[in-house]
Amino acid sequence: MKKYCYWWILLLQVCLLAGCGDDDYHYPSVKLEFLTAFAGPDGYLQSVVTDEGETLPVVEDKTKTKIEANASVRIISNYASEMTADGTAGVVLYALNGVLSVTPRTADKFEEGVKTDPADMLAIWMGHDYLNMTLEVKENGEHKFHFVEDEVTVDAVTGRSEVHLTLYHEAKEKVQSYTRRAYASVPLRQYAVEGIREVMVHFSIHTYSGDIKTYDFVYIP
């Protein structure tokens, strides 16, 4: 079966409630970040890896998210640091949502051809084994996203490779009313083959202005 990723991922909002008149209550310092979450044998999230590469246990997941047993998933989450029972650092997840994170395909793997409907890049940055981005697209009912692997070159002598990628985006309808944000992470670990010490990543996107913008990043496995 042909797979595409349909994701509408909105900016998360968390409301932390405290009892009225409780002057001693301190709101936790909540972060909104991309994370890689890992589930245990029961499918509930047990740990996360931050984009600084730190692995932290999940003290509590207030969303009660359940995925496939022993699987991992890319998320954007409102979370706060909290100590575990044994005194080590952990996290409390207050809200989360899935992030598009799929291995890029070569153009010939898209049976209906490569679609490059426009989108705007609000932010793009390198994370832990991922190239993260926040996209803005015009709402029109349904969108398909993926990543196209245009070219990969490897220099075995220098231990350096170059990867050219393009955002796949298909907007199903033409009526455009307002904009929304979508979040995506390109996994890069597959390019860290034996002997490669550095990967130059070139990521291109077709914008609403009619331009093609390319962003360059160095990935050190």
Image (cartoon, grey):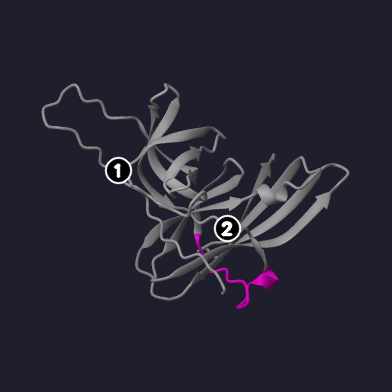
Residue 111 in the image: state x and y as whole percent. 63, 77
Badge 2 marks a residue whose secondary structure is loop
Quadrant of the image containing the C terminus: top right
**Extreme residue in the right direction:** 157
Residue 209's tag is none
Please name the residue that numbered disc 1 is placed on.
Answer: 14
What residue is rendered at 47% in x and 45% in y? 40
| Magenta span includes 157 | no
In the picture provided, is 136 more to the left or to the right than 60? right
| Amino acid, disc 1 | Val
Please name the residue that numbered disc 2 is placed on.
Answer: 102
**Extreme residue in the left direction:** 21
In the picture provided, is 129 more to the left or to the right than 136? right
Q: Camera-side residue: 213 or 98?
A: 98
Task: Reply above or below: 141 against 134.
Answer: below
What residue is rendered at 32% in x and 42% in y? 62
The magenta segment is: 107-119
Residue 50 in the image: state x and y as whole percent. 51, 37
Q: Local crowd at mark 2 within 10 Å, few (<14), some, or many (≥20)? A: some
